[in-house]
Image (tube, rainbow, N blue to C red):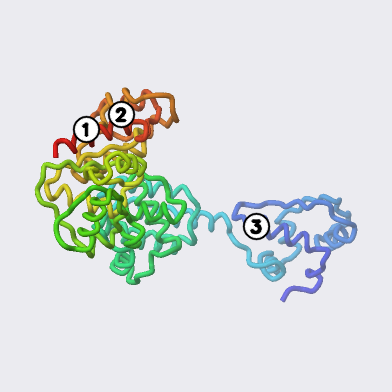
Amino acid sequence: MIPPYLRSPHLAALWKEAHRRLSTGAAVTAIRLRGLHDDERHALAELLATDRLPDADPRITIAALRESLDPIPLETVLTELVGPVDDQTARRREAAAEREGLWTWLASHPLLSARPALQAWAARLRAEPLITTVTETRDLIGRALAVIEALPAELLPLPVLAQRTLGGPHALDTGRLPALVLRAIAVETGRPDPLDAEQRREVWEAAGVVCDELSSTVLVAGLAPEGDSFLASTLRAAKAEGEAVAVTLGQLRRSPITFAPSTTVVSVVENPSVVQAALDRFGAAVPPLICVSGRLHVAARRLLRALTTAGLDVRYHGDFDPAGISIATDVITNLGARPWRMGAADYLDALAPGPGFDPDMVPATPWDATLREAMRREATTVYEEAVVDGLLDDLAIENRAN
């Protein structure tokens, strides 16, 4: 117990300032008080046993304060009246070392060596405030890495992925964990961070993960597969009526369709307006036409892979802008299609005043390296609708050939 006089409210400012300064962990030789009123000045003079009344802004040495309290340690008084004296500098050093250990662990994780694109994801995490504590953040990142390691998948339902990697079918439904995983997928696939439910679904699908089987669709017209399955019959009926059908992933999975070897060309476009224009012109005679609707859902991937695996000649056309080129690269490089009116000459022939884009965002065009050069130089979008007449003329040629 400390003497009652030390608990005087007139000394409270002294104890509070001494506690603040000593808790920094720095070497402190003196403290200064500001704006003391007369009662505080008299209480301080009595404590320090001085004949002279301190001024309103006194400087008090720590040595004099310790001497006035002897044999009671200053830290004992401060702990009882204000709280434990903490070495905040040491605590900050410990916290910094703990955070550095977290990022060292992440940087050395084998997955980041195996998939270097994830290093950009890790760098972004490090530049941001911790999600919670270091321990909880490490656990969260560790579980995210377990999910990322299982990707990309092949038409894997999201609940199955969550069960396999995290032990629960709903572990990736919402929250910080799926957000971490989605950001990693976005980095690896060259996409921006998803901001809404639709974008989150698209990013999952880019990694082969299916959020649901009904919202993943692909628009189909003029396709007549073999067999008597529901989907095969539906597509043949739609062709006979000159209609397009939005085929869901669930239908593709539950109702298999097959294609006989054929010389028929299957044309794939990015925008539904091209399909509408083709139906208006050809009706029931529309040649096989597929639309990815500005994005490559899992349903589109499954159908296009089935077509190329069956040996059909699949060609692709899309917008001449960074997003359109990304889709084209995916379809051509990963799904076995060939470019259709997607060369540098096609771009330059169709060029007209239009929306611009960041030239640095144009991805590589491996089927025609000069296309990327031209697009980066011109930095002007050419939408598919601007060249629809040429596309329809090509479809007419296919009709005559078949």
Mark 1, other Cα within 10 Å: few <14 / some 14–19 / many ≥20: some
At 30% from the left and 58% from the top, the residue drawn is 248
> Which mark sits nearer the N-terminus, 1 or 3?
3
The image quadrant that residue 19 belongs to is bottom right
The residue nearer to you, when weighing 400 against 354, is: 400
In the structure shown, which secondary structural element does the residue marked by tag 3 occupy? Answer: helix
The local secondary structure at tag 2 comes to helix
* Mark carried by residue 372: 2
Q: Position of residue 257 (x, y in %)?
A: 18, 58
Front-most of residues 2 and 51 = 2
**Could you tell me the amino acid type at mark 2?**
Arg
Q: Relative to 320, does residue 31 appear above or below in the rendering?
A: below
Q: Residue at x 19, y 33 (%)?
A: 397
- Report the side of 223 relative to 47 (left or right): left
- The quarter in which the C terminus is drawn is top left
Residue under pointer 3: 22
Front tag of 1 and 3: 1
Residue 212 is situated, as x and y percent measured from the top left of the image, at 34, 62
- Distance between mark 3 and mark 2 Cα atoms: 63 Å
* Cα–Cα gap, marks 1 and 2: 10 Å
Q: Secondary structure at mark 1?
A: loop
Looking at the rendered image, the quarter that the N terminus falls into is bottom right
- Measure how far apart labels 1 and 3 are at the Cα level: 69 Å
The amino acid on which the numbered mark 3 sits, given as a three-letter code, is Leu
Amino acid type for the residue under numbered disc 1: Trp
